Amino acid sequence: MWGGGVDVFYPAENTRLAEDIVTEGGARVSEQPMGLQPQARHFPARNRIISGMTQAVIVVEAAARSGSLITARTALDQGRDVMAVPGHPFDARASGCNMLLRDGARLVRSAEDVIEALSPLTEPAASISPELPLVDVPETRSLAEVAALLKRILDRLGPSPVGEDQLIRDLGASSKTISPALTDLELEGRIARGAGGVISLRT
């Protein structure tokens, strides 16, 4: 996945790797137009595709405000497992991972923890009860419905932070409906998240 156009190699030292991807039968994929230089705001949008293609997201190092945490929230919205490697509580580079663990992410101490977490996904299909739903099908909404929901969220928010739980109650909708919309607005740079799960309009 590319943050810019598929013909733009960033960083430059990855040029050989980019060429090998194609010659070895792979594909360079991007939502951005050809020739576009990657920008910071492109990477969270790119990462939502990466997390959607995975079984789980493992956060190894993340500050309290980092793109890795946006990716982790996107993975949760997509129904993926989120795991994190713990760090020293006074190390700013580990604060994001520690926050994820506090909020329920699976602890990763070694490769064995990852294998154990993913093992149910690799069991033969015959061992899965046919009475259990295999896929949690997300709600489908028209573009008009999505736009209306985003407008309701933006109309409710202001410069003063509001807790996400309070926002959900105010809108009378489920978190399953609101959380993906908030992620979209955050990726677009229209809202900002603060410590403690609060949300406000980005000024």
Image: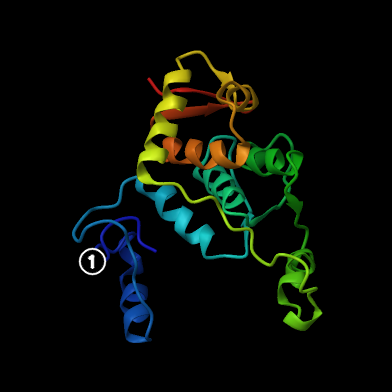
Q: Position of residue 57 (x, y in %)?
A: 61, 57
Residue at the limit of the structure toward the top, as seen here = 160
Task: Categorize mark 1 by other alpha carbons within 10 Å: few (<14), some (14-19), many (20+).
Answer: some
Q: Disc 1 on helix, strand or loop?
A: loop
Q: Report the residue at 25% width, 62% height from top.
A: 8
Q: In which quarter of the image is residue 19?
A: bottom left
Q: Report the residue at 62% width, 54% height from top.
A: 79
* Residue at numbered disc 1: 7
> Relative to 195, is 120 on the left or the right?
right
Q: Nearer the viewer, residue 176 or 22?
A: 176
Q: Position of residue 122 (x, y in %)?
A: 72, 76
Q: Quadrant of residue 114?
A: bottom right
| Vertical arrangement, residue 5 with respect to residue 149, above or below | below
* On-image quarter of the N terminus: bottom left
Q: Report the residue at 44% width, 41% height from top.
A: 184
How does the figure colour the protein chain or chains?
rainbow
Which residue type does callout 1 highlight?
Asp
Residue at the limit of the structure toward the bottom, as seen here = 24
Q: Nearer the viewer, residue 13 or 167?
A: 167
- Residue 129 visible in the shown view: yes
* On-image quarter of the C terminus: top left
Q: Report the residue at 44% width, 33% height from top.
A: 149
| Vertical arrangement, residue 104 with respect to residue 54, above or below | above
Q: Where is residue 105 in the image (x, y as percent from the top left)?
A: 72, 48
> Relative to 11, is 71 on the left or the right?
right
Q: Quadrant of residue 111?
A: bottom right
Q: Which of 132 and 122 is in front in this view?
A: 132
